[in-house]
Image (cartoon, rainbow, N blue to C red):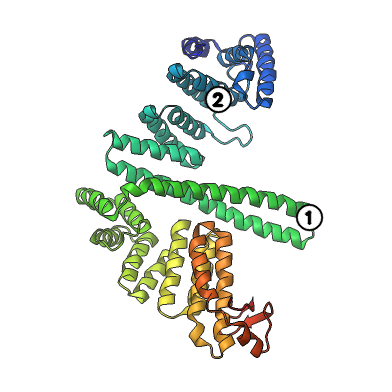
Amino acid sequence: MMIAVAFGMAMNVSAQEATQSKYGADSVACVTNLSIYGEAYKQWESAKFDPASISMEMVKAWREVFLNCPRSSQLIYTRGEKIMDYFVRTNPKDKDAYIDTICMMMDNRAKYFPTDPKTGASQVANIMGRKGLLIYTYNKNRYEEAYNVLKSAVEMDASQLQGAYIDAYFKATIDMVNNDKAEKMEIINVYQELSEVLDNNISALATTETELVAAKEDAESAGDAEAVAGFDKQIEKNEKNIYINKGVKNNLDNLFSPFASCDDLNKVFSAKMAETPDDVVLLKRITTILDKKDCTDSKLFLDAAVRLNELEPSPEASYNLGIKFFKDKKYSDAATFFEQATKTENNDRKYRAYRNLAFCHQNMGNFSRAREIARRAAQVDPTAGEPYLIIAQLYAESSKQFSGEIESRSVFWAAVDKCVKAKAIDPSIADRANSMIRSYTAAFPPMETIFFNDYNEGQSYNVGGWIGETTVIRARK
């Protein structure tokens, strides 16, 4: 059955003839077809979209609704995706014609339903993002078309893009470069652009997480069990979204890796910087990507950081200079610049500035100050586990500050506590946390030492000095 071409031929006429009425020129026919295809679709859905259960009567009725009363319901388009998916998969030789129909569906949805009925906000960028995703999903050979659609969606409103759209956009960008339809710099530019979108998403979700947790605590204090349950659901949903965004970001990094060796980045960026040495956007891109990829030892990074600071002094420029001084082990100078960098409005950069500032004070032996700053980093990004690993390191390194076998080893109990918390918050650092746990557990006191000092395993213990934390006594196994 070849219905896609018929759709394409009829659509121009339909677009001209459709009235402003929700149900089109023939409202009786529209309502009838809505009912026919709607009921049949529900049955097909109940059958879990089994290809053998599809009704051609449903398809015919849906087609009439789609062509003659396109404003009647947004379900025309969301359900239409399932119907078109069936035809794409069961008629591979006509796949491209059905993809064309899908594109037409997405365009009409954006035309007739430009705003989300639930929120009233624009959803056009999201619809175009989905259009690009579907093109790329069904036919990778149409990567250039998908790339252009997804690029336009990002330009409209990047915040509307879902993780799958971002993933498809970057893959299509790589295809463009691999087929000599774009320069390698385009991969770098799109990577940076999408990284910022994901960082902003994660930052916004982290802020929401903090607000939800605080609201839940207030509800618990008030004894409002119903409100607490409601906040638990919101927190669970928010954490799922954080996990999804972090997963997409990790996948983006993995896709970028083949193009992201320090040598490759320096080669591409050096050429661009030579062409436009005063391009602030380019300088920010250079310093940001080289920092993320740990390529900050290069002369290019220093030159870009210094020039950026000259052209546009800012927290971001200060951050870059902090990185350079830290690499040179000039921790006091680095700390000065990282302190300035914490004034940024970019939450990802603010988090990294606090984290690096904590490293500076750790290297200078200012353990209490380093812990204070690591806690600030954790406040900026409650989903990050690394601040707790920093605190664990600070505790472990404090062992020699304590006299007595129990006192000097108690810091390792507190350190392990922080490692456990770190990996519970952020599974991505679990391997590092587990490695540290093994190391610190080996430094626990043996059972006989605990016994001869009149303590018992499992007993509560307060670690003194600047640490001042309560932990639990554990023996080395």
**Residue at 48 percent of width and 50 percent of height:** 200
Q: Please state which amino acid type lies under the numbered disc 1.
A: Ala
Q: Is residue 286 above or below residue 451?
A: above
Q: Measured from the top left, where is residue 404 in percent x and y?
A: 56, 90
Q: Is residue 405 above or below residue 101?
A: below
* Label 1 CA crowd tier, 10 Å (few <14, some 14–19, many 20+): few
Measured in 3D between alpha carbons, the distance from the residue under mark 2 to the one under mark 1, in whole angstroms, is: 41 Å
Q: Measured from the top left, where is residue 167 in percent x and y?
A: 44, 40
Which circle, 2 or 1, is nearer the viewer?
A: 2
- Residue 472 visible in the picture: yes
Q: Nearer the viewer, residue 176 or 414?
A: 414
Q: Nearer the viewer, residue 323 or 247?
A: 247
Q: Nearer the viewer, residue 385 or 333?
A: 385
Q: Please state which amino acid type lies under the numbered disc 2.
A: Glu
Q: Which mark is residue 79?
A: none
Considering the numbered disc 1 on the image, is that residue within a helix, a strand or a loop?
helix
**Residue at 43 percent of width and 64 percent of height:** 353
Q: Is residue 474 above or below residue 90?
A: below
Q: Which mark is residue 81?
A: 2
Residue that badge 1 annotates: 225
Q: Measured from the top left, where is residue 304 in percent x and y?
A: 27, 58
Q: Nearer the viewer, residue 425 or 130?
A: 425
Q: Quadrant of the C terminus?
A: bottom right
Label 2 or label 1, whichever comes before in sequence order:
2
- Residue 387 visible in the picture: no
Q: Quadrant of residue 69?
A: top right
Q: Quadrant of residue 470?
A: bottom right
Q: How many marks?
A: 2
Q: Is residue 31 above or below residue 202?
A: above
**Residue at 28 percent of width and 51 percent of height:** 265
* Label 2 CA crowd tier, 10 Å (few <14, some 14–19, many 20+): some
Q: Measured from the top left, where is residue 45 in percent x and y?
A: 66, 25
